Amino acid sequence: MSLTFDQSGHLAHRSRPALWRRILDRLMAARLAEAQHAVNLCLSKLDDDELARLGYRRTDLAAMRDRSSRF
């Protein structure tokens, strides 16, 4: 990957767009998994009544945990 300066003086990266797309896809997947983990952690600390008020059940949390582990 070569680095050059464009006309405005900013550092520009010359690389294949497909490479950047793959990198961004992986970063987005990692951030999504991290966010889902944080939400699951917060929801897991609630008792069953509080979860029910939010519209969740323990089985919903388990299903979300299984889905987020795929990343």
Image (spheres, rainbow, N blue to C red):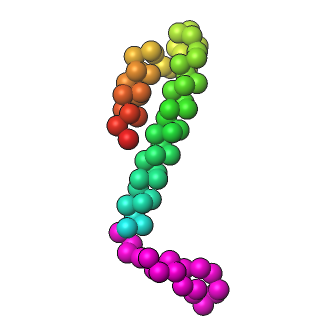
Q: Can you give x and y, in whole percent of width and height, for residue 48 in the image?
A: 53, 9
Residue in the foreground of this view, choosing between 7 and 49: 7
Residue 53 seen from this side: no
Which residue does the image show at 54% across and 85% down from the upper left? 4
Q: Is residue 20 left or right of residue 11?
A: left
Residue span colored magenta: 1-18
Q: Can you give x and y, in whole percent of width and height, for residue 53 in the image?
A: 56, 16
Up/down of 5 relative to 36, above or below: below
Q: Can you give x and y, in whole percent of width and height, for residue 63 in the image?
A: 37, 24
User: Quarter of the image containing the N terminus?
Assistant: bottom left
Quarter-of-image position of residue 21: bottom left
Which residue does the image show at 55% across and 32% down from the upper left? 38
Q: Can you give x and y, in whole percent of width and height, for residue 47 in the image?
A: 57, 10
Up/down of 15 relative to 47, above or below: below
Residue in the foreground of this view, choosing between 22 and 50: 22
Question: Residue at the right extreme?
Answer: 9
Residue 52 seen from this side: yes
